[in-house]
Image: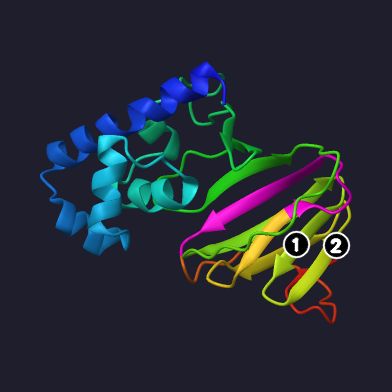
Amino acid sequence: MDGETEDVLDAVGPRLRALRRDRGITLADLAATTGVSESTLSRLESGQRRATLELLLPLARTYDVPLDDLVGAPRTGDPRIHLKPIRRFGMVFVPLSRRPGGTQAFKMIIPARPKPLEPTLQTHEGFEWLYVLNGRLRLVLGERDLTLPPGEAAEFDTSLPHWLGSADGGVVELLILFGLQGMRAHVRAAPHRSSHGGIQR
């Protein structure tokens, strides 16, 4: 992890504590609203727990602020769009939207590796829609193991165990829309649905 990223992450905890106190919200109230445990929130604010997207997204929704305001990263270009890359889980996320409390848009880049990683499934609240721009994406959804080439899309409830990675070790670029539980991408022209269910071509 580079020094700039370390500095940004180190500043997240104090910023979250100051924001909560400024809003007059207790840790117990925040835990009840976000679904994140009080102990995790306390460790996050004290710097004992590293910030992750899964932790920051519900906080951004609760405080009704853009995600990049929580990490305090400088804004560039169009003030409505923040293009400062965020590195998480060995991948790069480029925020493409500044819509607090609503659907968050990211460009996600999975770097090339000599050997593809083994899946580590995770779950969290929300709904995700993705579209592969370049490379071959390996998408594990529960017991399904799928490979999506460029031009393919998928949507799924993130409470289902899932994992994203490179299918062949090469770079993968994709667009991701992440929304609240129950929110879905609305398509006016209904796409053809394959036998895979949520996968659209």
Q: Indicate the quadrant where residue 155 lies.
A: bottom right
Disc 2 from disc 1: Cα separation: 6 Å
Q: How many marks?
A: 2
Q: Residue at x 13, y 51 (%)?
A: 26
Q: Is residue 32 left or right of residue 131?
A: left
* Label 2: element kind: strand
From the viewer's side, name the closer residue of 183 and 188: 183
In this figure, which residue is indicated by the disc labeled 2? 147
Q: Are marks 2 and 1 in contact (CB under 8 Å)?
A: yes
Q: Residue at x 85, y 78 (%)?
A: 194
- Residue 133 lies, with reference to residue 191, above or below; the image says above
Q: Is residue 1 left or right of residue 23?
A: right
Percent position (x, y) of residue 40? 30, 52
Magenta stretch contains residue 172: yes
Percent position (x, y) of residue 148? 84, 59
Q: Indicate the quadrant where residue 94 lies.
A: top right
Circle 1 Cα neighbour tier, 10 Å, few/some/many (<14 / 14–19 / ≥20): some
In this figure, which residue is indicated by the disc labeled 1? 139
Can the viewer see residue 43 in this picture? yes
Residue type marked 2: Thr
Q: Main secondary structure of the magenta part?
A: strand
Q: Is residue 153 left or right of residue 41?
A: right
